Amino acid sequence: MRAFIASYLLMLAVARALNNNEPEIWPSPNGKCAIKESFYGEGKLVRSIFVHLATGQSATIYPGGARTTSVLWSPDSHYVALTADRTKYRCEVKLFRVENGKISEIALPSNMGAKNYLSADAQEHLGSLSFEGMHAKRWLSNTQIEIVSETLANFLGDARDEFVSQHFIVEISKGEASIIKTYADKGA
């Protein structure tokens, strides 16, 4: 009988692991709000929803199309960074401000694309970018976040590909995000 129960429990654990369609919930540090996932499309795609816990009001902040999402709250709970893994080779970051139980998006600086930080030689010989993705790495303070941009550059007339990673320290002030520092992995 024990062997049967152990086998049954093992089968349940394996089934649960294989069908890990349990939505994630990321509560804010102050406990007033949360970001939660919602699955759709036969449980294969994710959308993200902001919830003000005191009122129960919610708003969809990432309408869908992601395979997974992850969330980083600022230490003071006034900002949140959402990383959405859209495809195998494409992640994106969205920044939001939370104020009085409401959430609004803050645009990332426009010059964070790979073509802006590749070396002059790389830009001159660039054939294509195989993928480009960003992810929020960590909050450095209540208003500063580190975001990493990664790409694989293919070069014309050359069989080599180069993986390039660039770190951006982004500061949020008065509802706008600006780059205050940037460095490559090797230049940290």
Image (cartoon, helix red, strand yellow):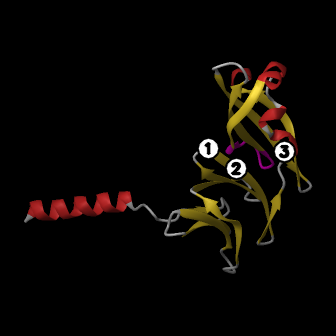
Percent position of residue 71, x then y:
64, 55
Q: Quadrant of residue 101?
A: bottom right
Give the number of the mark in front: 3 or 1. 1
Q: Quadrant of the N terminus?
A: bottom left
Residue 187 sits above or below residue 29 on the image? above
Q: Give, as a three-letter code, the residue at label 3.
A: Glu
Residue 171 has which mark?
Answer: 3
| Disc 2 + disc 1, Cβ < 8 Å | no
Query: Of marks 3 and 1, which one's residue comes earlier in the chain?
Result: 1
- Which quarter of the picture shows residue 24? bottom right
* Residue at the spot 56% in from the left edge and 63% down from the top edge: 45
Camera-side residue of 144 and 18: 18
Residue 54 to residue 116: above or below: below
The kind of residue tagged 2 is: Glu
Residue 114, percent across and down?
77, 35
Element assignment for label 3: strand
Q: Which residue is mark 2?
A: 92
Quick one: 56 or 179, which is closer to the camera?
A: 179
Q: CA distance from mark 2 to mark 1?
A: 10 Å
Q: Assess disc 3: are there few (<14), some (14-19) or many (≥20) residues with their C-alpha within 10 Å of its C-alpha.
A: some
Residue 32: x and y, percent?
68, 69
Quadrant where the C terminus sits is top right
Residue interval drawn in magenta: 134-144
Up-down relation of residue 32 to residue 111 (above or below) = below
Residue located farthest toward the front when viewing the structure as drawn: 157
Which residue in the protein does label 1 denote?
A: 89
Q: Earlier in the sequence, mark 2 or mark 3?
A: 2
Q: Residue at the left extreme?
A: 1
170 lies above or below 12: above
Kind of residue sitting beneath label 1? Tyr
Q: Is residue 160 magenta?
A: no
